[in-house]
Image (spheres, rainbow, N blue to C red):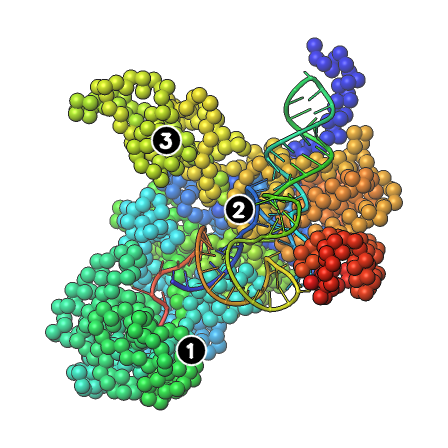
Amino acid sequence: MELADCFPLFAMALIFRMRMNYNFNEIEAKWQKYWAENQTFKAENNSDKPKYYVLDMFPYPSGAGLHVGHPLGYIASDIYARYKRHQGFNVLHPQGYDSFGLPAEQYAIQTGQHPALTTEENIKTYRRQLDQIGFSFDWSREVRTSDPNYYKWTQWIFIQLFNSWYNKDADKAEDISELINIFETEGNSKVNAVCDDAIEPFSAEEWNAFDSVKQQQLLLQYRLTYLAETEVNWCPALGTVLANDEIVNGVSERGGHPVIRKKMTQWSMRISAYAERLLQGLDKIDWTESLKETQRNWIGKSVGASVKFKVQSSKFKVEEPTTNNQQPTTISVFTTRPDTIFGVSFMTLAPEHELVSQITTPEQKAEVENYIEATAKRSERDRMADVKTITGAFTGAYVEHPFTKEPIPVWIGDYVLAGYGTGAVMSVPCGDQRDYDFAKHFNIPIPNIFEGADISEGAFADKDNTIIANSDFLNGLSYKEATKKVISELEKLGQGQGKTNYRLRDAVFSRQRYWGEPFPVYYVDGMPHMIDAKHLPIRLPEVEKYLPTETGEPPLGNATVWAWNRLKAEVVSNELIDNINVFPLELNTMPGWAGSSWYFNRYMDVHNTEEFASQDALNYWKDVDLYIGGSEHATGHLLYARFWQKFLFDKGLVPVDEFAKKLINQGMILGTSAFVYYTFYSLIEKDGSNVIIDRKRIIIPKELYYQVLSTGKDEFLENIVRYDIDSELLKRLDNDELILITPIASTHVPVEYVNSSDELNIDSFKSWHSDFKNVGFDSKEGIYKVGREVEKMSKSKYNVVNPDQICEEYGADSLRLYEMFLGPLEQYKPWNTAGITGVHGFLKKLWKLYVGDDGLNVNDDEPTRDNLKTLHKTIKKVQEDIENFSFNTSVSTFMIAVNELTAQKCTSKEILEPLLILLSPYAPHIAEELWYQLGHNESISTAPFPKFDASHLVESSKNYPISFNGKMRFTLELPMDFNAQQIEEAVMANEKTQEQLQGRTPKKVIIVPGKIVNIVG
RNA sequence: GCUCAAGUGGCGGAAUUGGUAGACGCGCCGGAUUCAAAAUCCGGUUCUUCGGAGUGUGGGUUCGAUUCCCACCUUGAGUACCA
């Protein structure tokens, strides 16, 4: 028999009481359903309201699902989006998936399961988890980069890039047909384009006489995406190229296999064309300074001069240029310090420099070749690890100083990089530390050309304090003056000019991967041709295996239906390739950043089948007003996306050339890993045979672990024995046996086995892993305290905390508030579940403020002065906080408001209703529910944000802090309208003042009315 | 090495233009309620020799500095010979 049968009235009361409690699970499910059914957050492309576009960096849907770190930025942007809706904006707040990528493919390789299937499953999990947190996303605009309807337009943009070149005179991308026009009428001599180095000059006649393959080859050197032989990171063990971020310390991130540099024909993006505009553009966008700085460093602009040095055939004779002479006549260098040209005492070329073999004298040949061979052998890793060793070789050749005409010896050295500038430097040992070290090492003279500089210990590289000396016409000039002067002199000689260099390299765009966008490219006579845009998308073909082919081709080489029939305009079986009408298709796929470089534009008009987005939509939404994401994308996604946006802008396809006005980096939420410490001991036959009799793993306390790390081993043995003295094993220790203890070690344990006092659940731990099943523990106390360390959250560290369990236990509103409450958005911070009870308690208290034991506590009472004061200071603070992205402080503000209103026993609707609107961006479910209970039929989401009224905060008196020599000693309540003199009189008359002064006369009394009183003396 | 960011109670953190350092929350301590526990509520909680001292260290500017300036130390992130 149940309690309710005996005491029906009691049971009724119990149920009633329960309903009055804050039942977050029920409330949250109810409103999530309501929002979805009513499409509450659908953004309209036609609206009289001003637009506001809030964007998150879309996630890669991994198999592990979301952990509590992922939603941090999403919660912040959601608060902002909801706030903007309350402010009357038409808010676009979309979400989607960056769903092409490596993990799904790796999983496919291991299991044979199609990446599309696992991706679909992962997306389902993500969607469920995102929905459960109550985000106000407009899901009708979802994008997935792996959806053919999406990557159709990624392919389309690729074609636009292929059909463009960069005209430096117009400083923008232009159609390739215009370049062809120029070639046809005047050749390439006058073309000022960003293109490959050293393109042969040709006339219009020559161009028109070239066959089409030759023409295509030449055009490729100008196109914004081009096919070229590039050095890539090839991992033979994995059979694929790896991106830079997939390599850690010279080996592959997965598996730790060696990686070598290898030349391969790859698609590249001519991002270098946009280097200057990418740099300049940073000044007009409101991104975090550190992120802009990272991009500036990455672009790496340096202003200087290029200088040509004439090569001397002998030590004293300059080579005369002759038409049939194969000998080089000049070597170009790039320098940022042309002002130091009179300090040049040698020149250094990169070992790979193409002129090395031509200029090396027969006497030096052997030495130079040995050196080149030795450096080629040194791996990238060795070079990185060992920057201090100075190596080099003399070529025997000399160049002539442009002004003094003195001979300058030419060396080679691997401190000069082949890939930067011209691969050659004019070495000024007195002004550059690397040149200085090199000169010292090889006993090359170090002439000093700086007035008053001491170069006995090192180079003098201070530009600001430079005064040039021993430098002919530059004597007495500063860095700036000398630079200007020397450049004009070099120009007169025809041996140099001002030049700007960028570190930014063109980006490799090919991946030997399956799970990425296929290129809309087929090959005729080895030359790439674009498939006509109207036939897009070119869909990813089915393959048997996701690994490279036996001949080393990318996974698409396994596809049997992967050829292009030009007549039928369709993908057909490889067997039909005849290189007349049917041609092979490209086997590489695009990298991860292809789809993410333009997705923000697609959200504006996601279902458009005719264009990547309509001009109407693009002109209405224009750009992202607020973009939130991680700083790890600083030099990847965020640079490439800016590049593509500028390109699309040049082509008139988008209305703005920067896609995101404001960008905020959310910090990472770190995990608090738990560790146990252990060692093994073994009993060994003492007869010298070292036969192991028994062996056991034992868990040692954290303290012992650290003690052993810092002290000796003898003590360790003693400690272990004492620690585990009761164990069975040790009882068997007798004179015939020796105990051997192996080194101590630590291992991660799942954080869910550890309580908030760091105590390990020993039973769970023992059943977790077979290694620990029979492990020895100090069983006397039955408690083991784990070690703690803050690390990145990751599956392998067993420190992942999942939002699902938090939502279930405390609710999404608690999760949202707590993630914000943890600290400033940008900061990295460890996750610690302990504090969540605080915000959860706050929500319960809030609920109680509105709903009492007998129902709703809200009426039409006139608010008191205190009520109004609490409300309006809350409005002011919360509004300021949201606009400053200081979400952590508004959570405190809400707590203070609820604490105060509870103490005031406030029941006034005039106060409690606006308070809900303030709270609704942060804790939308509870706000919606209470809003509904207050009698509203419409969602709270578009209710106007309360207006702050300063008149409610006006005080009639002020509790003045009275300081003595800057130290506050007591406070004194004085009327607000007292002037400085009245305040001084009141303070001086106070007995506490006299007590502090102890008879002294103050030297000075500082009074800031309304703020502070400070008595000096 | 260089660049950037940050150092405040036992912990996360607050302090808006230089003006009462430690808001708010956690934890801890004490109390109420309860047979008991959970939950809830109330009070306390930087240190202190009770004079004061105190925001990484040392200096400076100021009537007054967590806040501004100089030097240094520590930690984290990024970058790697970029001429």
Q: Which badge, 2 or 1, is on the more N-terminal residue?
A: 1
Q: Chain of mark 3?
A: A
Which numbered tag is attached to residue A678? 3
A3, A743: nearer the viewer: A743
Look at the numbered discs 1 and 3 and tell me whether their residues touch, using CB distance below 8 Å.
Answer: no
Q: Which amino acid, mark 2?
A: Lys
Q: Which residue is mark 1?
A: A465
How much space separates mark 1 and mark 3, taking CA atoms?
59 Å
Per the image, label 1 sits on a secondary structure element best described as loop
In depth, the one of A1012 and A760 nearer the eye is: A1012
Tell me the residue at 37%/50% (across/down). A246
Q: Is residue A830 left or right of residue A869?
A: left
Report how far apart the C-alphas of labels 2 and 1 lie in the structure.
43 Å
Picture coordinates of residue A780, whole percent (x, y): 44, 21
Residue A390 in the image: above or below residue A45: below
Residue A623 is drawn in which quadrant?
bottom right
**Circles 2 and 1 on the same chain:** yes
Q: Which residue is mark 2?
A: A829
**Mark 2 or mark 3: which comes first in sequence?**
3
How far apart in space, not on screen, are marks 2 and 3 (Cα)? 29 Å
Q: Residue at x 28, y 58 (%)?
A: A386
To the question of a shared chain for discs 1 and 3, the answer is yes
Quadrant where the C terminus of chain A sits is bottom right
Chain name for mark 1: A
Q: Residue A111 placed where, x, y %?
A: 38, 36
User: How crowded is the residue under tag 3: few (<14 C-alpha within 10 Å), some, or many (20+)?
Assistant: many
Q: Residue at x 34, y 17 (%)?
A: A728
Residue at 59%, 51% in the rendered image: A824
Seen in the image, is B42 located left or right of residue A645?
right
